[in-house]
Image (cartoon, helix red, strand yellow):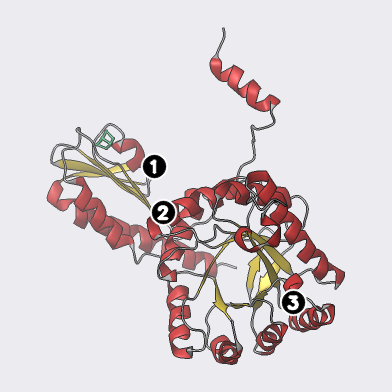
Protein backbone atom coordinates (compact mmCIF):
# COMPACT_ATOMS: atom_id res chain seq x y z
CA UNK A 1 0.00 0.00 0.00
CA UNK A 2 1.30 3.44 -0.89
CA UNK A 3 1.81 5.63 2.17
CA UNK A 4 2.88 9.22 1.80
CA UNK A 5 4.77 9.05 5.12
CA UNK A 6 7.08 6.30 3.77
CA UNK A 7 7.71 8.28 0.67
CA UNK A 8 8.52 11.39 2.71
CA UNK A 9 10.91 9.51 5.01
CA UNK A 10 12.72 8.07 2.01
CA UNK A 11 12.92 11.50 0.48
CA UNK A 12 14.43 12.93 3.68
CA UNK A 13 16.81 10.00 4.10
CA UNK A 14 17.99 10.39 0.54
CA UNK A 15 18.79 14.01 1.26
CA UNK A 16 20.47 13.06 4.57
CA UNK A 17 18.21 15.54 6.32
CA UNK A 18 16.57 13.00 8.55
CA UNK A 19 18.44 12.92 11.81
CA UNK A 20 18.01 10.27 14.42
CA UNK A 21 20.18 12.19 16.83
CA UNK A 22 18.64 12.79 20.21
CA UNK A 23 19.55 13.98 23.66
CA UNK A 24 20.56 10.52 24.85
CA UNK A 25 23.56 10.84 22.54
CA UNK A 26 25.47 13.77 23.98
CA UNK A 27 28.47 14.91 22.04
CA UNK A 28 31.57 14.04 24.05
CA UNK A 29 34.01 16.76 24.95
CA UNK A 30 36.88 17.19 27.32
CA UNK A 31 35.90 18.64 30.71
CA UNK A 32 36.72 22.21 31.55
CA UNK A 33 36.42 23.51 35.11
CA UNK A 34 35.21 27.00 35.93
CA UNK A 35 36.01 27.06 39.64
CA UNK A 36 34.37 23.88 40.90
CA UNK A 37 31.79 23.73 38.11
CA UNK A 38 32.51 21.18 35.41
CA UNK A 39 31.54 22.03 31.86
CA UNK A 40 31.52 19.24 29.28
CA UNK A 41 33.10 15.85 29.86
CA UNK A 42 29.63 14.30 30.15
CA UNK A 43 28.59 16.52 33.06
CA UNK A 44 25.34 18.44 33.49
CA UNK A 45 24.53 21.18 31.02
CA UNK A 46 25.40 24.24 33.11
CA UNK A 47 23.26 27.39 33.29
CA UNK A 48 24.98 30.75 33.29
CA UNK A 49 24.14 34.42 33.00
CA UNK A 50 25.77 37.83 33.14
CA UNK A 51 25.46 40.81 35.47
CA UNK A 52 24.08 44.13 34.21
CA UNK A 53 25.45 46.35 36.97
CA UNK A 54 28.46 48.61 36.71
CA UNK A 55 31.13 46.12 37.78
CA UNK A 56 33.04 48.84 39.62
CA UNK A 57 30.01 49.25 41.90
CA UNK A 58 30.96 46.33 44.12
CA UNK A 59 27.86 46.39 46.35
CA UNK A 60 25.41 46.43 43.46
CA UNK A 61 27.32 43.78 41.49
CA UNK A 62 27.76 41.53 44.51
CA UNK A 63 24.03 41.79 45.26
CA UNK A 64 23.13 40.91 41.67
CA UNK A 65 25.53 37.95 41.63
CA UNK A 66 23.84 36.67 44.78
CA UNK A 67 20.35 37.14 43.29
CA UNK A 68 21.49 35.15 40.26
CA UNK A 69 22.94 32.41 42.47
CA UNK A 70 19.69 32.31 44.48
CA UNK A 71 17.77 31.87 41.22
CA UNK A 72 19.91 28.81 40.42
CA UNK A 73 22.52 30.38 38.15
CA UNK A 74 25.66 28.22 38.30
CA UNK A 75 28.25 30.56 36.75
CA UNK A 76 28.09 34.35 36.50
CA UNK A 77 29.92 36.44 33.91
CA UNK A 78 30.81 40.05 34.59
CA UNK A 79 31.97 42.69 32.14
CA UNK A 80 35.44 44.08 32.77
CA UNK A 81 35.68 47.03 30.41
CA UNK A 82 38.29 49.08 32.28
CA UNK A 83 40.65 49.27 35.20
CA UNK A 84 37.97 50.38 37.66
CA UNK A 85 36.06 47.19 36.94
CA UNK A 86 39.26 45.12 37.19
CA UNK A 87 39.99 46.63 40.60
CA UNK A 88 36.59 45.44 41.86
CA UNK A 89 37.33 41.81 40.96
CA UNK A 90 39.24 40.66 44.08
CA UNK A 91 36.35 41.77 46.26
CA UNK A 92 33.73 40.22 43.99
CA UNK A 93 35.60 36.91 43.68
CA UNK A 94 36.14 36.68 47.44
CA UNK A 95 32.45 37.15 48.21
CA UNK A 96 30.87 35.14 45.43
CA UNK A 97 29.03 31.90 46.08
CA UNK A 98 29.32 30.90 42.40
CA UNK A 99 32.31 30.92 40.01
CA UNK A 100 32.84 34.18 38.13
CA UNK A 101 33.98 34.76 34.55
CA UNK A 102 35.53 38.06 33.49
CA UNK A 103 34.36 39.24 30.08
CA UNK A 104 37.22 41.15 28.49
CA UNK A 105 37.78 42.55 25.02
CA UNK A 106 41.15 43.42 23.52
CA UNK A 107 43.09 44.60 26.61
CA UNK A 108 45.39 41.82 27.76
CA UNK A 109 46.29 43.82 30.89
CA UNK A 110 42.72 43.51 32.13
CA UNK A 111 42.94 39.76 31.57
CA UNK A 112 46.15 39.62 33.62
CA UNK A 113 44.51 41.66 36.40
CA UNK A 114 41.50 39.33 36.39
CA UNK A 115 43.77 36.27 36.65
CA UNK A 116 45.65 37.94 39.49
CA UNK A 117 42.31 38.63 41.23
CA UNK A 118 41.53 34.89 41.27
CA UNK A 119 38.84 34.96 38.58
CA UNK A 120 37.49 31.49 37.73
CA UNK A 121 37.23 31.95 33.97
CA UNK A 122 37.95 34.39 31.18
CA UNK A 123 36.02 35.25 28.08
CA UNK A 124 38.54 36.79 25.75
CA UNK A 125 39.38 36.16 22.11
CA UNK A 126 43.14 35.74 21.81
CA UNK A 127 43.20 36.98 18.21
CA UNK A 128 41.88 40.34 19.39
CA UNK A 129 44.85 40.85 21.70
CA UNK A 130 47.11 41.10 18.68
CA UNK A 131 50.71 40.92 19.86
CA UNK A 132 51.68 37.20 20.26
CA UNK A 133 53.82 38.03 23.26
CA UNK A 134 50.78 39.47 25.05
CA UNK A 135 48.75 36.38 24.20
CA UNK A 136 51.58 34.29 25.70
CA UNK A 137 51.39 36.31 28.92
CA UNK A 138 47.63 35.77 29.23
CA UNK A 139 47.93 32.05 28.51
CA UNK A 140 50.76 31.69 31.03
CA UNK A 141 48.68 33.44 33.71
CA UNK A 142 45.66 31.24 32.96
CA UNK A 143 47.69 28.02 32.85
CA UNK A 144 49.37 28.66 36.17
CA UNK A 145 45.99 29.27 37.86
CA UNK A 146 43.83 26.70 35.99
CA UNK A 147 41.68 29.42 34.48
CA UNK A 148 39.74 28.35 31.39
CA UNK A 149 39.11 30.69 28.48
CA UNK A 150 35.95 31.00 26.43
CA UNK A 151 36.40 32.02 22.84
CA UNK A 152 33.17 33.85 22.11
CA UNK A 153 32.32 34.45 18.46
CA UNK A 154 29.36 36.73 17.73
CA UNK A 155 28.09 36.82 14.14
CA UNK A 156 27.50 40.56 14.23
CA UNK A 157 31.01 41.52 15.24
CA UNK A 158 33.33 39.36 13.13
CA UNK A 159 35.00 41.03 10.14
CA UNK A 160 34.25 38.02 7.92
CA UNK A 161 30.46 38.43 8.21
CA UNK A 162 30.16 40.20 4.82
CA UNK A 163 30.79 39.15 1.25
CA UNK A 164 33.52 41.02 -0.65
CA UNK A 165 30.82 43.21 -2.25
CA UNK A 166 29.55 44.29 1.17
CA UNK A 167 26.39 42.17 1.30
CA UNK A 168 25.87 40.57 4.72
CA UNK A 169 26.43 36.84 4.82
CA UNK A 170 23.58 34.61 5.88
CA UNK A 171 22.88 30.96 6.56
CA UNK A 172 25.66 28.56 5.58
CA UNK A 173 28.05 31.31 4.46
CA UNK A 174 27.74 33.13 7.77
CA UNK A 175 28.08 29.87 9.71
CA UNK A 176 31.28 29.06 7.80
CA UNK A 177 32.64 32.50 8.57
CA UNK A 178 31.87 32.09 12.28
CA UNK A 179 33.49 28.66 12.42
CA UNK A 180 36.54 29.89 10.51
CA UNK A 181 36.87 32.80 12.92
CA UNK A 182 36.55 30.52 15.94
CA UNK A 183 39.14 28.10 14.52
CA UNK A 184 41.69 30.91 14.13
CA UNK A 185 41.37 31.75 17.82
CA UNK A 186 41.36 28.09 18.85
CA UNK A 187 44.60 27.51 16.91
CA UNK A 188 46.26 30.44 18.67
CA UNK A 189 45.52 28.94 22.09
CA UNK A 190 46.45 25.43 20.95
CA UNK A 191 49.70 26.85 19.59
CA UNK A 192 50.48 27.92 23.14
CA UNK A 193 49.71 24.42 24.43
CA UNK A 194 46.48 25.63 26.02
CA UNK A 195 43.43 23.36 25.92
CA UNK A 196 41.22 24.53 28.77
CA UNK A 197 38.80 26.33 26.52
CA UNK A 198 35.17 26.39 25.49
CA UNK A 199 33.67 27.97 22.44
CA UNK A 200 30.51 29.88 21.62
CA UNK A 201 29.17 30.82 18.17
CA UNK A 202 26.29 33.16 18.83
CA UNK A 203 23.98 34.92 16.39
CA UNK A 204 20.56 36.52 16.58
CA UNK A 205 19.35 34.46 13.62
CA UNK A 206 18.74 30.85 14.56
CA UNK A 207 19.69 29.41 11.15
CA UNK A 208 23.40 30.42 11.03
CA UNK A 209 23.80 29.84 14.75
CA UNK A 210 22.55 26.26 14.57
CA UNK A 211 24.53 25.57 11.39
CA UNK A 212 27.70 26.97 12.94
CA UNK A 213 27.52 24.82 16.07
CA UNK A 214 26.72 21.73 13.98
CA UNK A 215 29.71 22.50 11.78
CA UNK A 216 32.13 23.09 14.63
CA UNK A 217 30.99 20.30 16.97
CA UNK A 218 32.76 17.41 15.18
CA UNK A 219 35.94 19.41 14.57
CA UNK A 220 37.04 20.11 18.15
CA UNK A 221 37.08 18.32 21.51
CA UNK A 222 36.20 21.38 23.59
CA UNK A 223 32.89 22.07 25.37
CA UNK A 224 30.39 24.33 23.62
CA UNK A 225 28.60 27.27 25.20
CA UNK A 226 25.22 27.82 23.50
CA UNK A 227 23.31 31.06 23.19
CA UNK A 228 21.27 33.27 20.93
CA UNK A 229 22.76 36.71 21.18
CA UNK A 230 20.57 39.77 21.76
CA UNK A 231 17.60 37.42 21.81
CA UNK A 232 15.23 40.21 22.87
CA UNK A 233 12.48 40.82 25.39
CA UNK A 234 11.40 38.11 27.81
CA UNK A 235 8.64 36.64 25.63
CA UNK A 236 10.30 36.86 22.21
CA UNK A 237 13.79 36.13 23.56
CA UNK A 238 12.67 33.09 25.52
CA UNK A 239 11.00 31.57 22.48
CA UNK A 240 13.92 32.34 20.15
CA UNK A 241 16.39 30.92 22.68
CA UNK A 242 14.29 27.84 23.32
CA UNK A 243 14.17 27.06 19.60
CA UNK A 244 17.85 27.73 18.81
CA UNK A 245 19.38 26.28 21.98
CA UNK A 246 16.76 23.53 22.13
CA UNK A 247 17.46 22.28 18.60
CA UNK A 248 21.14 21.85 19.36
CA UNK A 249 20.63 20.31 22.78
CA UNK A 250 18.22 17.83 21.23
CA UNK A 251 21.01 16.78 18.88
CA UNK A 252 23.35 16.30 21.83
CA UNK A 253 25.31 19.51 21.20
CA UNK A 254 25.93 21.95 24.04
CA UNK A 255 27.55 21.88 27.48
CA UNK A 256 26.53 25.21 28.99
CA UNK A 257 23.80 27.67 28.02
CA UNK A 258 22.94 31.29 28.47
CA UNK A 259 19.53 32.72 27.63
CA UNK A 260 20.11 36.42 26.87
CA UNK A 261 17.06 38.55 27.63
CA UNK A 262 16.46 42.28 27.80
CA UNK A 263 15.42 41.95 31.41
CA UNK A 264 16.88 41.52 34.87
CA UNK A 265 19.35 38.63 34.44
CA UNK A 266 17.60 36.63 37.17
CA UNK A 267 14.71 36.23 34.71
CA UNK A 268 16.98 34.27 32.37
CA UNK A 269 17.54 31.44 34.83
CA UNK A 270 14.07 29.87 34.99
CA UNK A 271 13.84 30.11 31.19
CA UNK A 272 17.17 28.29 30.81
CA UNK A 273 16.11 25.56 33.23
CA UNK A 274 12.72 25.27 31.53
CA UNK A 275 14.54 24.53 28.25
CA UNK A 276 16.65 21.85 29.95
CA UNK A 277 13.66 20.37 31.77
CA UNK A 278 11.57 20.32 28.60
CA UNK A 279 14.23 18.14 26.97
CA UNK A 280 14.62 15.95 30.08
CA UNK A 281 18.26 17.00 30.26
CA UNK A 282 18.13 18.27 33.82
CA UNK A 283 15.86 18.06 36.80
CA UNK A 284 15.40 21.36 38.54
CA UNK A 285 12.40 22.09 40.69
CA UNK A 286 8.85 21.24 39.70
CA UNK A 287 7.45 20.40 36.30
CA UNK A 288 3.86 21.47 35.83
CA UNK A 289 1.46 19.93 33.36
CA UNK A 290 -1.74 21.86 32.74
CA UNK A 291 -4.22 21.82 29.91
CA UNK A 292 -5.35 24.89 27.98
CA UNK A 293 -8.98 24.05 28.89
CA UNK A 294 -11.81 24.02 26.36
CA UNK A 295 -15.59 23.86 26.20
CA UNK A 296 -15.56 20.59 28.17
CA UNK A 297 -14.02 22.14 31.26
CA UNK A 298 -16.46 22.55 34.16
CA UNK A 299 -14.10 23.78 36.86
CA UNK A 300 -12.49 27.20 37.27
CA UNK A 301 -9.16 25.99 35.88
CA UNK A 302 -7.02 29.07 35.19
CA UNK A 303 -7.04 30.57 38.73
CA UNK A 304 -6.34 27.13 40.16
CA UNK A 305 -3.35 26.62 37.83
CA UNK A 306 -2.04 30.09 38.73
CA UNK A 307 -2.28 29.31 42.44
CA UNK A 308 -0.54 25.94 42.09
CA UNK A 309 2.22 27.46 39.95
CA UNK A 310 2.74 30.23 42.52
CA UNK A 311 2.82 27.66 45.30
CA UNK A 312 5.50 25.69 43.48
CA UNK A 313 7.75 28.69 42.87
CA UNK A 314 9.76 28.07 46.02
CA UNK A 315 10.01 24.31 45.68
CA UNK A 316 13.52 23.23 44.68
CA UNK A 317 12.96 19.50 44.42
CA UNK A 318 11.87 17.87 41.16
CA UNK A 319 8.17 17.02 41.35
CA UNK A 320 5.65 16.67 38.53
CA UNK A 321 2.23 18.19 39.15
CA UNK A 322 -0.69 18.00 36.72
CA UNK A 323 -3.80 20.16 36.79
CA UNK A 324 -6.24 19.13 34.06
CA UNK A 325 -9.68 20.39 33.14
CA UNK A 326 -11.71 17.25 32.48
CA UNK A 327 -11.77 13.50 32.08
CA UNK A 328 -10.78 13.47 28.40
CA UNK A 329 -7.03 13.87 28.94
CA UNK A 330 -7.09 14.57 32.67
CA UNK A 331 -6.76 11.11 34.22
CA UNK A 332 -3.90 10.09 31.90
CA UNK A 333 -1.78 13.15 32.66
CA UNK A 334 -2.76 13.17 36.34
CA UNK A 335 -1.76 9.51 36.69
CA UNK A 336 1.62 10.13 35.04
CA UNK A 337 2.42 12.97 37.43
CA UNK A 338 3.62 12.63 41.02
CA UNK A 339 0.35 14.29 41.95
CA UNK A 340 -2.44 15.39 39.67
CA UNK A 341 -6.00 16.57 39.41
CA UNK A 342 -8.53 15.66 36.73
CA UNK A 343 -11.51 18.02 36.86
CA UNK A 344 -15.13 17.01 36.45
CA UNK A 345 -18.42 18.87 36.93
CA UNK A 346 -17.55 21.14 39.86
CA UNK A 347 -15.64 18.21 41.34
CA UNK A 348 -12.37 16.46 40.57
CA UNK A 349 -10.28 13.38 41.19
CA UNK A 350 -6.85 13.61 42.81
CA UNK A 351 -4.23 11.08 41.74
CA UNK A 352 -0.92 10.39 43.43
CA UNK A 353 1.71 8.22 41.79
CA UNK A 354 -0.83 6.75 39.42
CA UNK A 355 -3.44 5.87 42.06
CA UNK A 356 -6.73 7.61 42.78
CA UNK A 357 -6.52 9.28 46.17
CA UNK A 358 -9.97 10.80 46.42
CA UNK A 359 -12.77 12.72 44.74
CA UNK A 360 -13.31 16.26 45.98
CA UNK A 361 -15.47 19.33 45.60
CA UNK A 362 -13.82 22.23 43.79
CA UNK A 363 -13.18 24.33 46.91
CA UNK A 364 -11.01 21.50 48.27
CA UNK A 365 -8.70 21.23 45.25
CA UNK A 366 -6.04 23.67 46.37
CA UNK A 367 -5.70 22.55 50.02
CA UNK A 368 -5.62 18.89 48.97
CA UNK A 369 -3.08 19.45 46.22
CA UNK A 370 -0.76 21.46 48.48
CA UNK A 371 -1.04 18.90 51.28
CA UNK A 372 -0.27 16.13 48.79
CA UNK A 373 2.69 18.05 47.36
CA UNK A 374 4.12 18.62 50.84
CA UNK A 375 3.72 14.97 51.73
CA UNK A 376 5.50 13.84 48.57
CA UNK A 377 8.32 16.31 49.17
CA UNK A 378 8.71 15.03 52.72
CA UNK A 379 8.94 11.47 51.40
CA UNK A 380 11.53 12.50 48.81
CA UNK A 381 13.61 14.30 51.44
CA UNK A 382 13.43 11.32 53.80
CA UNK A 383 14.49 8.96 50.98
CA UNK A 384 17.40 11.25 50.09
CA UNK A 385 18.64 11.48 53.67
CA UNK A 386 18.46 7.67 54.00
CA UNK A 387 20.53 7.30 50.83
CA UNK A 388 23.12 9.71 52.26
CA UNK A 389 23.31 7.84 55.56
CA UNK A 390 23.68 4.40 53.99
CA UNK A 391 27.33 3.52 53.23
S1 LIG B 1 -8.23 18.00 29.43
FE1 LIG B 1 -10.40 18.33 28.99
S2 LIG B 1 -10.72 20.49 29.44
FE2 LIG B 1 -8.53 20.23 29.21
S3 LIG B 1 -8.19 20.71 27.08
FE3 LIG B 1 -8.39 18.51 27.23
S4 LIG B 1 -10.54 18.12 26.79
FE4 LIG B 1 -10.39 20.30 27.25
Residue 157 in percent (x, y) is at 63, 63
Q: Quadrant of ligand 1?
A: top left
Asked which quadrant contains residue 226, the reply is: bottom right
* Quarter of the image with the N terminus in it: top right
Q: Which residue is mark 3?
A: 129
Name the residue that disc number 1 marks.
336
Which element is circle 1 on? helix
The quadrant the C terminus occupies is bottom right
Quarter of the rendering containing residue 319: bottom left
Assess whether mark 3 and mark 1 are in contact (beta carbons under 8 angstroms).
no
Q: Position of residue 32 (x, y in %)?
A: 70, 68
Question: Which residue is depicted at the point 64% across and 50% down?
Answer: 167
Q: Is mark 2 within 8 Å of ligand 1?
A: no
Work out whether residue 63 or residue 348 is closer to the camera in this orientation and state it: 63
Report how far apart the C-alphas of labels 2 and 3 lie in the structure. Answer: 35 Å
- Secondary structure under tag 2 reads helix
Tag shown at residue 36? none
Amino acid sequence: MYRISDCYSEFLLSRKEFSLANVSKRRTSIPVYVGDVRIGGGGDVVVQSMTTTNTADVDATRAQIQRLADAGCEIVRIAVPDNNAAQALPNLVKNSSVPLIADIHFDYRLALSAAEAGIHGLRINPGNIGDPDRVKQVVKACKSRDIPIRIGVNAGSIPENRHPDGRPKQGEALAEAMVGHAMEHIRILEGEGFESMKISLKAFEIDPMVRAYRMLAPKIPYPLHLGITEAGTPRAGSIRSAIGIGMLLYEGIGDTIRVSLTAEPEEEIPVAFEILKSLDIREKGPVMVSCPSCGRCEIDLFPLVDKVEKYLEHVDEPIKVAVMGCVVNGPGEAKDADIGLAGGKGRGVIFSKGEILETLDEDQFMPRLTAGIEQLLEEKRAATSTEVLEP
